[in-house]
Amino acid sequence: MRIGVLTGGGDAPGLNAAIRAITRKAVAERIEVIGFRNGWLGALTGSWLPLNIQAVTGILPRAGTILGSSRTNPYTREDGPATVKRQLEELGVDAMVPIGGEDTLGVAAQLSAEGVKLVGVPKTIDNDLYGTEFSIGFDTAVEVVRDSLDKLHPTAEAHDRIMVVEVMGRHAGWLATVGGLAGAAHAVLIPEQPFSLTDLLQRIRRRHEELGKMFSLVVVSEGAKCSDWGAEVTGSDQVDEFGHVRLGGIGHRLAVEMEARTGFETREVVLGHLQRGGSPSAFDRVLATRLGVEAVKQVQGENFGVMVGLQGGRITTTNLQEIRGRTHDLDMELYGLTDLFY
Ligand code: F6P
């Protein structure tokens, strides 16, 4: 048997841990593994490399992905799906294990419905994939947000400033909520709940005047919306092959408005792709290992068209058709805890 692995979409710490686990489990089961380069692009062009013990030794602690990634969508390419199927047939790939987020696994769901044998593995720092409580990369990204807030507290306090910290997450507020709670943010603004600028300013003023704390840390998700401004703030009007616009800029706009309307000195910090870097946390290394091994076991059991996940502490499988168009919604009770610390 020959398995094809790929990593697609935004990279995340833990991808190499998953590649390593898939390879080691496959080798132990005498299954051959190849890695397609740069997500679905490699499956389209037939660009691959052999994955064996030598190829994966030592990669557990490394962020990024030894296979490379891309946001290639075969369904926007002429004859894309047919080309992928032909490549798999010509290369003798019996089953695919795509590792990715909503876009990569959305392609997987479509190909699966068209007969391609595959088992998906969830990866995204946004943690918004339905069918798993944790996606590979989320925990490590939370640590980047927490560490950044720990570093920003002293300088904000030293200068009696408001620090606005823009975090990733696209249209999900998981990273802002969990990172903000862990980093003791005084306000957390998320896409799921548009915020009122007037309300935010009142609460920050109250913190400064009543508590006598003349500094604040405001975490704002890149996809958050201000009810006074309407649409989300974008970094450019270009869209990728899945129709996603590039978000970014709300941190700066909010900092300018807050300083103008409160008179408090305000600065912004955009964490950006720092949240996609760094050696994977222990949690992500173990999660990726468990999910990678389980994906090979599902292939062996010929249980195709599913995504492995972690739910209630147990490794589960969810039908990819059930996942399409659904998200792992933010726990708004958890988000409510951030209100305590305004
Ligand atoms: O989906 C993961 C993610 O990091 C989002 O949080 C972010 O908006 C997007 O990818 C950035 O994409 P790119 O790395 O292609 O700019």
Image: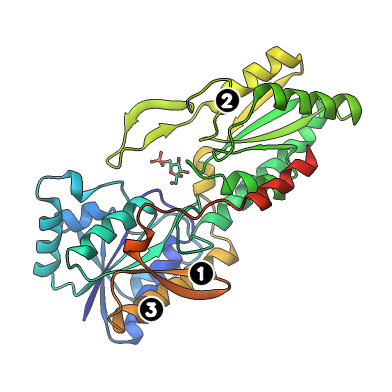
Q: Position of residue 264 (x, y in %)?
A: 77, 18
Q: Earlier in the sequence, mark 2 or mark 3?
A: 3
Please tell me in which quadrant of the rendered image residue 115 appears: bottom left
Asked whether the beta carbons under mark 2 and mark 3 sit within 8 Å of each other, the answer is: no
| Vertical side of 140 occupied by 112: above or below | below
Under circle 2, the secondary element is: loop
Mark 3 crowdedness (10 Å alpha carbons): few <14, some 14-19, many ≥20: many
Under circle 3, the secondary element is: helix
Front residue of 285/336: it is 336
Q: Position of residue 117 (x, y in %)?
A: 22, 71
Q: Which residue is mark 1?
A: 310
Q: Which residue is mark 3?
A: 24
- The circle drawn on residue 219 is none
Asked whether the beta carbons under mark 1 and mark 2 sit within 8 Å of each other, the answer is: no
Q: Earlier in the sequence, mark 1 or mark 2?
A: 2
**Residue 232 seen from this side:** yes
Amino acid type indicated by mark 3: Arg
Please tell me in which quadrant of the rendered image residue 119 appears: bottom left
Quadrant for ligand 1? Answer: top left
Q: Position of residue 140 (x, y in %)?
A: 57, 55
Taking the image as shown, residue 33 lies to the left or right of residue 159, namely left
